[in-house]
Image (spheres, helix red, strand yellow):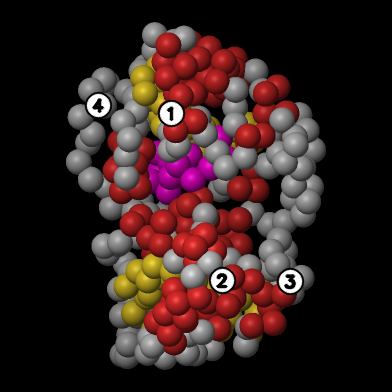
Amino acid sequence: MLMNTRNFRIAIVRLSALGDIVNSAVVLQIIRKHYPNATIDWYVEEAFASILQNHPLINEVIAVPLKRIKKTKSFTLLRETIRSLKSHPPYDQIIDAQGLLKSALVASFLKGNVHGFDRHSAREAIAARFYDTASAIPYEMNVIKRNVLVITEALHIPYDENDILHKEPLFPLRERPQELTHLKNIACVIGASWASKCYPKEHFASLCDALSYPCYLIWGSESEHLDAKWISDHSSNAHVAPKMSLIELVSFIGHCDLIIGNDTGPTHMAWAMNRPSITLFGPTNERMIFPTVSNLGIKSPSSVNILKINRNDFSIRDIDPSVILQKAKELLK
């Protein structure tokens, strides 16, 4: 039912990681389509809050310092955070779109009906104990479709895959970065949260050499920065991208003509910004992306049990750079 006549208040709880936030943001356009006058607040881990700040479809971004609480073990900070969560006005619908104990706890401190995944489909079954209503959505399902379904079911919105396929860019696009001076530019995302998700730097160097347009190496940590320097030293076509904020990174990705990278947040930004991409998979699989004609996945030969990920699966090393090169050439056309 379309809510045009009153201020329907919605809270989305999606805390981390960056890729989860990027892959969830499509729900904002879907909610606005059916609830154009709604107030939409997003509760997010403070380390990633900047990517959502000033988003035109969000009323308020609430940064939750869970990692800082865990690191400092500060009871005072924990108490202040809980007090702050409880102080927000009531919501008509609260949606835990993550299905973890920590996200369920955050949602439970807010006022209003809480909806999430049921115990059979939540990533952590205990989270379901904190919900008033729940959706049965298999964990093995495509993650973007899961993100959309749990929210559309909570808000009684009909699911339409065209809302995903024909989305507008999910984040505002800033001016073109000055580094991107060529006719076409490629971004290579060389890092990831696990070592086994990372395509070898030697392969990236070979791939960059074989591509016809300059490749900019995206990095986010000092170890990734060192790898980027190594690749650029071993490939005349590879360039170390500058250090960027999340907002700057979104626009950098949004202005590139192709993004090649590991299964990680910055690579997923390509799909979010409607840019062509190739995502490389080893211990994970194509469930993590929403494949389109311009957003492809290349999986290593290993099999994946998504319910029990093997972090020691380094089979991503077995993906031949020539396979990526062929797909890249097709997308660059």
Residue 321: give its label.
Answer: none
- Distance between the alpha carbons at the discs numbered 1 and 2: 32 Å
Q: Which residue is mark 2?
A: 103
Of the numbered discs 1 and 4, the one sitting upstream in the chain is 4
Residue in view at x 27 percent, y 47 percent: 173
The reply to whether the C-beta atoms of the residues labelled 1 and 4 are less than 8 Å apart is: no
- Start-end of magenta stretch: 262-275
Residue 179: give its label.
Answer: 4
Of the numbered discs 4 and 3, the one sitting upstream in the chain is 3
Q: Residue 130's x, y, as percent?
A: 64, 83
Of residues 191 and 288, the one drawn nearer to the viewer in this rendering: 191
Of the numbered discs 3 and 1, the one sitting upstream in the chain is 3
| Membership of 271 in magenta stretch | yes
- Distance between the alpha carbons at the discs numbered 4 and 3: 46 Å
Q: Are there few (<14), some (14-19), or many (20+) residues within 10 Å of tag 3?
A: some
Mark 4 secondary-structure assignment: loop
Q: Are there few (<14), some (14-19), or many (20+) residues within 10 Å of tag 4?
A: few
What's under tag 4, amino acid-wise? Glu
Which tag is nearer the camera, tag 2 or tag 4? 2
Q: Which residue is mark 1?
A: 225
Of the numbered discs 3 and 2, the one sitting upstream in the chain is 2
The reply to whether the C-beta atoms of the residues labelled 1 and 2 are less than 8 Å apart is: no
Q: Which residue is mark 3?
A: 125
Q: Are there few (<14), some (14-19), or many (20+) residues within 10 Å of tag 1?
A: many
| Membership of 148 in magenta stretch | no
Mark 3 secondary-structure assignment: helix
What's under tag 2, amino acid-wise? Ser
Of the numbered discs 2 and 4, the one sitting upstream in the chain is 2
